[in-house]
């Protein structure tokens, strides 16, 4: 009983621990995409391939999925490929609804305007993700220990109530 409750507490604490890192990983990937668009001037699938080689595993798999959808014979737009990939990886990336809203909003304009607008959209998205990261760090500071202790204490309380 104590073990189960402790594990639930640790799982909840893990969300608060991993969210800032996931936001940082997306910021890194989007910064590299900005560089690819601005200086590399490579097509989007090639840029995503280059970036995916230098990202953390989860972000890399996400970018490869976007690339795969773009190159498929289905004729997906960059926006559709981005959104479909986000939906597929939603359970694997510890982000909240606001984070996904920012990333979805970014995807809507991906590949649909000129270079300057793409860079402006990237900069806006990066600043929004940075704000979300700061909020996530604050939430982590407040809630990570709380969930760890809450899991253990709930387990102890249940054991005391049952015996």
Image: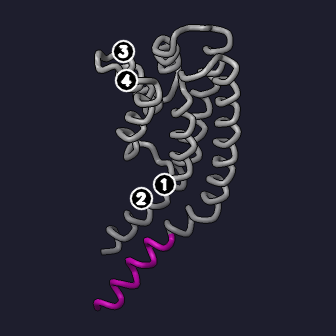
Image position, residue 34 (x, y; %): 64, 21
Quick check: 111 left or right of 152?
right
Say which label, 1 or 3, has the lower sequence index.
1
The residue singled out by tag 1 in the image is: 15
- What's the CA distance linking mark 1 and mark 4? 32 Å
Above/below status of 31 relative to 133: above
In front of the other: 110 or 67: 110
Magenta range: 149-163
Q: Which numbered circle lies on residue 76?
A: 4
Q: Secondary structure at mark 3?
A: helix
Image position, residue 130 (x, y; %): 68, 42
Q: Nearer the viewer, mark 3 or mark 4?
A: 4
Say which label, 1 or 4, has the lower sequence index.
1
Q: Which quadrant of the figure has residue 67?
A: top left
- What's the CA distance linking mark 2 and mark 4? 36 Å
Say which label, 3 or 4, has the lower sequence index.
3
Say which label, 2 or 4, has the lower sequence index.
2
State the predominant SS element of the stretch in magenta: helix
Above/below status of 119 relative to 139: above
Contact (Cβ within 8 Å) of mark 3 with mark 4: no
Q: Secondary structure at mark 2?
A: helix
Q: Nearer the viewer, mark 2 or mark 4?
A: 4
The residue singled out by tag 2 in the image is: 11
Q: Which quadrant of the figure has residue 38?
A: top right
Residue 150 on the magenta span: yes
Image position, residue 158 (x, y; %): 35, 84
């Amino acid at each position: 009983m104590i073990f189960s409750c402790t594990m639930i507490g640790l799982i909840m604490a893990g969300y608060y621990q991993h969210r800032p890192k996931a936001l940082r990983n997306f910021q890194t990937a989007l910064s590299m995409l900005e560089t690819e668009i601005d200086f590399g001037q490579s097509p989007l699938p090639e840029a995503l391939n280059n970036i995916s080689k230098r990202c953390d595993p989860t972000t890399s798999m996400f970018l490869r999925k976007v690339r795969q959808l773009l190159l498929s014979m289905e004729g997906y737009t960059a926006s559709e490929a981005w959104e479909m990939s986000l939906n597929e990886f939603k359970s694997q990336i510890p982000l909240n609804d606001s984070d996904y809203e920012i990333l979805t909003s970014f995807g809507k304009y991906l590949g649909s305007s000129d270079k300057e607008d793409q860079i402006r959209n990237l900069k806006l998205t990066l600043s929004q993700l940075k704000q979300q990261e700061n909020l996530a760090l604050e939430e982590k500071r407040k809630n990570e220990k709380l969930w760890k202790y809450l899991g253990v204490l709930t387990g102890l309380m249940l054991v005391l109530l049952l015996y």
